[in-house]
């Protein structure tokens, strides 16, 4: 009975060191294989339980700024082939508010293809 259990345990060895025709399973290799398999199954179950027990959380933050207060946005974009008169800015927010053609506070500087300033800043 003892040698039968011993040979079955040895057949479970995942980490045999030589090709299958030259291998000899060991009891230590079998225990390592069993331990690794148990650890993998345990980690898989723990991860599945953690995934299934997750509760979604959501939060809503109210913007307390006044409705007429605007957010200042600084940006620097260069389009050498685009004339300043055709450059406009459209802004939309997450609530769907859209403001089109915001050019009043945008400063535009004409440039060449080599990114050199050509004329005065246009506001």
Image: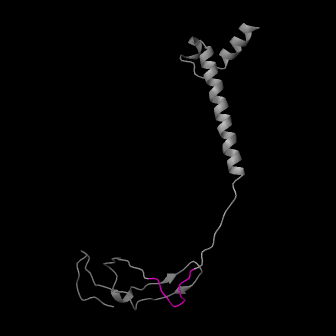
Residue 47: quadrant of the picture: top right
Depth check: give the residue in front, 96 or 78: 96
The residue shown at (63%, 69%) is 59
Residue 106: quadrant of the picture: bottom left
Residue 60, horizontal then vertical, whole percent: 63, 73
Residue 77's place in the image compared with 8, above or below, is: below
Per the image, is 70 magenta?
A: yes
The residue shown at (60%, 78%) is 62
Per the image, is 90 magenta?
A: no
The residue shown at (61%, 23%) is 32
Residue 113: quadrant of the picture: bottom left
From the image, which quarter does the N terminus lie in? top right
Residue 56's place in the image compared with 86, above or below, is: above
**On the rendered structure, is 55 left or right of 111?**
right
Q: Does residue 29 appear in this view?
A: yes
Depth check: give the residue in front, 114 or 1: 1
Residue 82, horizontal then vertical, whole percent: 34, 82
Q: Does residue 13 appear in this view?
A: no
Q: How many marks?
A: 0
**On the rendered structure, is 27 left or right of 90?**
right
Segment tinted magenta in the rendering: 63-71
**On the rendered structure, is 54 left or right of 86?**
right
Q: Main secondary structure of the magenta part?
A: loop
């Amino acid at each position: 009975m003892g040698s039968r259990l011993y040979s079955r345990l040895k057949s479970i060895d995942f980490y045999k060191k030589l090709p299958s025709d030259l291998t000899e399973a060991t009891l230590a290799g079998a225990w390592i294989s069993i331990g690794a398999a148990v650890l993998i199954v345990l980690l898989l179950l723990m991860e599945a339980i953690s995934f299934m027990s997750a509760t979604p959380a959501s939060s809503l933050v109210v913007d307390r700024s006044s409705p007429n207060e605007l957010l200042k946005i600084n940006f620097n974009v260069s389009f050498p082939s685009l004339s300043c008169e055709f450059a406009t800015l459209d802004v939309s927010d997450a609530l769907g508010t859209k403001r089109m053609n915001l050019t009043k506070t945008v400063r535009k500087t004409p440039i060449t293809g080599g990114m050199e300033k050509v004329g005065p800043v246009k506001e």
